Amino acid sequence: MSQFDQGLCKHRIKASYNEFRAKEKVIADYVMEHPEKIIHSTISQVAENLNVAEATVFRFCKRIGFKGYQAMKIALASEIVNDVKDIHETIQEGDDEKQIAEKVFKSNIRTLEDTLSVIDSDKMKKAVDILVSANRIEFYGNGGSGVIAQDAHHKFIRTGIPTAAYSDSHFQMMSASQLSEKDAVVFISHSGTNRNILQTLQVVQEHRIPTIGITSLAKSPLSEKVDVALFTLSGETEYRSEALASRLAQLSLIDALYVNVSIRRKEQMQESVNKMRQAISRTRI
């Protein structure tokens, strides 16, 4: 069973919608608007209702990550049940402070669970291999993603690997020009379409530097061009944009990478942390 056979049918459709062909969009619209009909219909019935070939429906299911129509039906049925639960998690103006806090926490938990479900073990291992082998690691992100880059730098400096984080596009470009193929760069962008980030990526690739991208599940220039793409999944609400909600998932992916690298570099990390503690202790006199 693939990672997407377990659910996230609607997320996959939303993320890939702009890349669908005309007939695929017809099927996608039908699935999103009439999920109950899908789970109670055969592939033949759906094909007949939409005036498309059964093979077209089957290819659509494969396109969004399922083994076939039946697997998509099972995932969609599971989502319908969860959607019913989520209705009660929508923030209302009459909610008190505790209720709002509970709903925010539940939304964050859902974001982490959804992101965990789309982590590809092979890509995660490849990303860790790149970071462990790097002489230097730099983290690039603009705007809100720049904050995530700073957090990554704050963590990875403990591994003993020289690191840096830049949120200014000019600093990113200048620093990237000084790196070599023995280094590594992690690009953080929710949309994966940020022009400045993509321009810096081009410079990095010209120097044959290994690259990792942390972005949303939607197909984007960043996810297609980096050596390893790690994805986050998050939903948009009335009070929080999808990009804002994704930051928690981005932070968690950074944490997962950091812990993996720390385990691989246990001795170097311990030595680095001890040096940091000694330095910091001098300021507490």
Image (cartoon, helix red, strand yellow):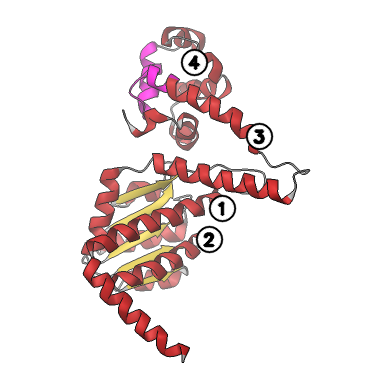
Task: Give the number of the mark in front: 3 or 2.
Answer: 3
Q: CA distance from mark 4 to mark 2?
A: 39 Å
Mark 4 lies on a secondary structure that is helix
Q: Amino acid at mark 4?
A: Ile
* Residue on which disc 4 sits: 39
Q: Of helix, strand and loop, which one carries label 3? A: helix
Amino acid at dot 2: Gly
The disc, 1 or 3, on the residue closer to the chain's N-terminal end is 3
Query: Quick one: which residue is furthest to the right in this view?
Result: 94
- Is residue 42 shown left or right of residue 177? right
Q: At numbered mark 2, what does the secondary structure look like: helix, strand or loop? A: helix
The residue indicated by pointer 2 is 144
Residue that carries the numbered disc 1 in the rendered image? 244
Residue 56: horizontal and vertical position, in percent? 39, 17
Label 4 or label 2, whichever comes before in sequence order: 4
Q: Quadrant of residue 91?
A: top right
